[in-house]
Image (spheres, grey):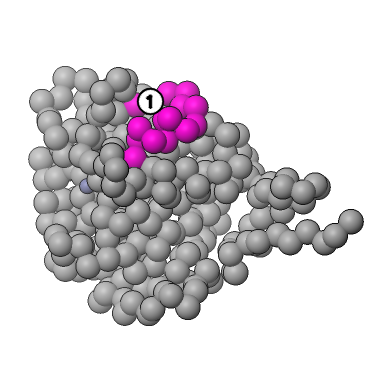
Amino acid sequence: MGAWLLLVPRGFPGRWLGLVCMAPLACVPATRPPLGEAWFSVLDVGQGLATVLRTTHHTLVYDTGPGRPGGYDAGAAVVVPFLRYWGVQQIDTLMVSHADNDHSGGAPSIRATLHVDRLLGGIQGAEPCVRGMTWNWDGIDFRVIHPTADTAFVDNDASCVLRVAWPGGSLLLTGDIGHAAEHQLLLHTPEDLPATIIVAPHHGSHAGSTLAFVNTVAPQMVIYATGYRNRYHFPNPEVVARYAAVGATSFNTAQQGTLDFQLRPNRPTTVQSWRFVARHYWHFPIPPDEGVQTPVD
Ligand SMILES: [Zn+2]
């Protein structure tokens, strides 16, 4: 019998994995998070947002990146390969924050490839997100905190806002909400906002992350999901400065590629950047934006 070669990107988070290679073509990442822990990834889909959160037995996909028939489709090109790499057979919940293409465009190809148990959010055929929806997977709490059932918000401000909590920390996924939705949250349920990690509303644009909102969330980490040299110049420097002023460490998919966060119970969150751990010769150095730090492995 010949030797089997297992190809894993150099530096891929091997220390997180137990790699099982029992037979030809059966080499798969075998490990999932232990109970009470979650692994959260913000995928590099260019200008847009796609994230995956896995618990011991469940998988959530929140937003799918952009996609156009006959054109670039982040669902087929990035999200599905990522899930397959990790051996994910089905998506328990696919939450699409709102209908804008940079969040929803990859959904059709994902749904055509993988079974989706529950479809939530702002696209056709989905169950609407309503404040108060809650569930618990493997010791991790999920709670929709926006919009309310009687919401008058539309478009970006109607984005599903999801709060994820594990022992000792919390994460806010905010879609593309802007000042109006932030104001509503601050006015009625400010207790929902403080978080360890936030994916900045609307890619860190000036339309979101008001000073009051940033000061109330007061995250330790902020993630900007942006495309390299995007035409909107996201993230906005004033917004970056606001998060820096509350002491948040910043990450940006445009500079650092896909970001993997280990949300560990009562222990510090660890972060790995694909551009950092899986660097190839075609990855020319991108100088970090001011205030955007490169994580140390
Ligand atoms: Zn967007």
Observer-nearest residue: 70 or 255?
A: 70
- Please check the rendered image and state whether residue 175 is part of the magenta-colored stretch, yes or no: no
Is 234 left or right of 128, judged from the image as shown?
left
**Residue, x 85% and y 60% (percent of image)?**
2
Q: Is mark 1 on a helix, strand or loop?
A: strand
**Residue, x 53% and y 54% (percent of image)?**
262
From what the image shows, is residue 87 above or below residue 19? above
Residue 160: percent from left, percent from top: 27, 34
Is 61 left or right of 189, judged from the image as shown?
right
Type of residue at label 1? Leu
Number of labelled discs?
1
Residue 162: percent from left, percent from top: 34, 37
Observer-nearest residue: 98 or 195?
A: 98
Is 82 left or right of 25, judged from the image as shown?
left
**Residue, x 49% and y 27% (percent of image)?**
115
Q: Mark 1 points at which residue?
A: 119
The quadrant of the rendering that contains the N terminus is bottom right
Image: magenta residue range: 105-120
Residue 193: percent from left, percent from top: 29, 44
